[in-house]
Image (cartoon, rainbow, N blue to C red):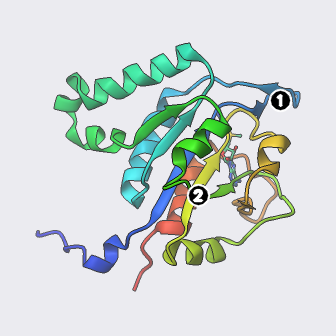
C-alpha cells in the first residue's frame, strides 16, 4: 500500500532543538550533581527528535569520559557497523551534539548570535509556566526554541532561573508525575510538534 504522501504543510519549517541536561541536576537529597548518560536516552530521544522534526539534540555533560562514551555510541551508529546495519538509526543520530554545560549549550544553539527561547520542563509546578498551546503557537509562528529536559531528580532551581519559559508538568488526574525523561520527551514533542487529526 502506497504511504499517504506528506503534503508540504506536513513539513512546516520548525526551529526546535532539544537538550538532555546531565549537569546541573539534583540527586534524591537535593544535592547538585552531574548524572551519568544513559544509552537508552541517546537512542530514544534521537528517534523521537527525528520523528518530530527537531533540529539538534544536545547532550550536556561536563565529564570527558561521558562525552567520549556518547561520541563512541554516536559514531557506531553514524559511521560504524550500526550505520550499515540500521540506516534509520543512523539518520536519527545525525542530529546529536555534545556540550559541557548550559552556557556552552546556549552559545552553541544560538543562530547568528541570537539565543533561542529556552523552555524547560519539570515534573513539578513552577510559577512562570506557559501552556503547551501557547508554546505550540510560538513555534508555528517561527520562534527558535530550545527545549530542556533534566535527568536524575531534575534540573536545579539555578538552571531553571535562567530559562525563558517553563512548560506545565505533564499530568493525568492523580498526583503521580514521575515520568522517565524518554516518555516526557515524546509527549512534549507530540503536544508541541505533532500533526493533529484533520
Ligand atoms: N533517569 C530518570 C528517568 O529517565 O527516569 C530521569 C528522570 S528526570 C528527572 C525526568 C525528566 O523528564 C525531568 O527532568 C523533566 O525534564 C522530564 N519529566 C519527567 N516527568 C515529567 C512530567 N510529569 N512533566 C514534564 N516533564 C517531566
Q: Quadrant of the C terminus?
A: bottom left
Residue 92 pos. (x, y %): 34, 44
In this rendering, the count of numbered labels is 2
The answer to whether any part of residue 182 appears in the image is no
Q: Which residue is mark 2?
A: 116
Q: Which residue is mark 1?
A: 28
Mark 2, other Cα within 10 Å: few <14 / some 14–19 / many ≥20? many
* Above or below for 152 versus 131: above
Q: Quadrant of residue 14?
A: bottom left
The front one of 182 and 142 is 142
Q: Quadrant of residue 27?
A: top right
Looking at the image, is mark 2 or mark 1 nearer the viewer? 2
Q: Quadrant of residue 1?
A: bottom left
Residue at image coords 57%, 26%: 37
Cβ at disc 2 under 8 Å from ligand 1: no
* Above or below for 64 versus 109: above
Marks 2 and 1 close (CB-CB < 8 Å) = no
Q: Secondary structure at mark 1?
A: loop
Residue 108 pos. (x, y %): 53, 42
Residue at image coords 78%, 48%: 160
- Left or right: 140 in relation to 31: left
The answer to whether any part of residue 166 appears in the image is yes
Mark 1, other Cα within 10 Å: few <14 / some 14–19 / many ≥20? few
Amino acid at each position: 500500500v502506497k504511504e499517504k504522501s506528506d503534503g508540504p504543510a506536513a513539513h512546516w519549517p520548525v526551529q526546535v532543538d532539544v537538550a538532555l541536561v546531565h549537569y546541573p541536576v539534583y540527586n534524591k537529597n537535593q544535592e547538585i550533581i552531574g548524572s551519568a548518560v544513559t544509552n537508552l536516552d541517546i537512542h530514544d530521544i534521537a528517534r523521537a527528535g527525528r520523528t518530530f522534526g527537531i533540529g539538534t539534540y544536545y547532550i550536556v555533560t561536563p565529564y570527558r569520559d561521558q562525552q567520549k562514551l556518547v561520541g563512541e555510541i554516536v559514531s557506531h551508529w553514524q559511521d560504524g557497523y550500526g550505520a550499515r546495519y540500521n540506516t534509520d538509526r543512523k539518520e536519527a543520530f545525525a542530529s546529536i551534539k555534545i556540550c559541557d554545560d548550559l552556557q556552552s549549550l546556549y552559545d552553541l544553539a544560538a543562530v547568528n548570535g541570537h539565543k533561542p527561547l529556552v523552555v524547560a520542563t519539570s515534573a513539578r509546578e513552577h510559577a512562570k509556566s506557559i501552556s503547551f498551546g501557547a508554546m505550540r503557537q510560538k513555534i508555528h509562528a517561527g520562534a527558535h526554541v530550545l527545549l530542556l529536559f533534566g535527568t536524575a531528580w531534575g534540573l536545579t532551581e539555578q538552571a531553571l532561573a535562567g530559562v525563558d519559559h517553563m512548560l506545565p508538568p505533564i499530568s493525568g488526574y492523580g498526583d503521580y508525575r514521575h515520568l522517565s525523561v524518554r516518555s516526557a520527551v515524546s509527549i512534549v514533542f507530540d503536544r508541541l510538534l505533532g500533526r493533529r487529526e484533520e
